[in-house]
Image (cartoon, rainbow, N blue to C red):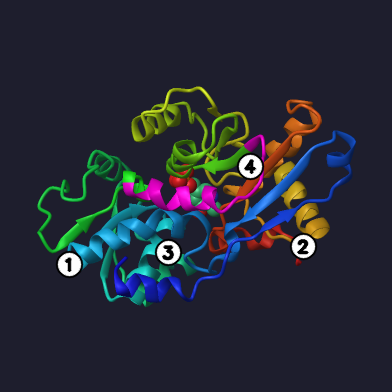
Amino acid sequence: MHAKLIQLQSHLKTSSLTKLDFPILKQHQIELWLKRDDLIDPVISGNKWRKLKYILNHALNMQVDTIISMGGAYSNHLHALAYAGHKLGLKTRGIIRGERPAVLNPSLLDMINWGMELEFVSRAEFRRFRNYKHYQSLPGIQASQYWLPEGGSTRLALRGVAELVDEINGDYDYITVPCGTGTTLAGIVKSIRPGTKAIGFSALKGGGFLTDDVIKLTDSPLENWHINIDYHFGGFAKTTEELLAFINQFQQQSGIILEPVYTGKMLYAVFDLIEKQYFQPGSKIIAIHTGGLQGKRGFNSKFLKT
Ligand SMILES: *Cc1c(COP(=O)(O)O)cnc(C)c1O
């Protein structure tokens, strides 16, 4: 690994496993553990560090000076990339979906403060950027620049996610994870042991296409994994009273903070499926807390103080 990346990694915390204790778990004889990737770092948190690690290493070794990527106005991916770029001495540029807002939100302000150059593009234009998958494939890109697709969705990302799986000791039956682009799930699918199942939960409505994306990234047929698309709560970053109530209650009982875009929906789904007896009694589930708590700032008024 590049010396600068080793230096950055030395400041990160380890991700532990927390066993959850809720009456419904005892009742259905389910062991539910949270893999606390949210603890890794407040900014490069959770799956964003996992996905970026070997991409940043590649970019540093290629001696590029700029990484260009894309995302929404609250993107945890761009937020983490801007911070990492700042720490590693790499310039960053973020292509943001939609018009420049009159007042920039806290996530965008952080990105600017860490030196990221922001470019706001129309939704149609934004979709076009999704066609470019290879790090040199962006039209007009220079040799000193590195293109990173939305959500860091590349094969190099899978290697970092595999380290998350390798850190989990002992036997378990399921790994569950929220899906935005499905890249984190793809990394898990690539690295889980035979006999273990992985379930991704789509954070967006109409997430059917995610299955194809994960198959493309992994070359793994749908044998021991699938994506559940039933718990989107109206669409990406949409919430309902029920979801918010679940998150508030979860936070108060466990002392662990969730956000409503990804981890809140995934854990709502896991508890709901437990109640519906989807999992055999005696099953052990590892749910990945993918972090991303900075993105919660757009929703703060909806949550109880913890
Ligand atoms: C970005 C993000 C995801 C989605 O990850 P993908 O690899 O794009 O599926 C899930 N959870 C959190 C907290 C995130 O920030």
Q: Is residue 199 above or below residue 59?
A: above
- Left or right of 138 in this view: 212: right
What label does residue 266 carry, if any?
4
Quick one: label 1, few (<14), some, or many (20+) residues within 10 Å? some
Q: Ligand 1 closer than 8 Å to the CB at disc 3?
A: no
Amino acid at circle 2: Gly
- Label 2: how many residues lie within 10 Å, few (<14), some (14-19) or many (20+)? few
- Tell me where the magenta segment starts and ends, as one range: 156-174
Pointer 2 residue: 255
Give 232 or 121, whichever is nearer the viewer. Answer: 232
Q: Residue, x 44% and y 31% (percent of image)?
A: 210
Instruction: Indicate which disc, 4 or 1, sits on the residue closer to the N terminus.
Output: 1
Mark 2 element type: loop
Compute the Cα span from label 4 to label 1.
Answer: 38 Å
Q: Which residue is mark 3?
A: 80
Helix, strand or loop at mark 3: helix
Q: Residue at x 68, y 36 (%)?
A: 269
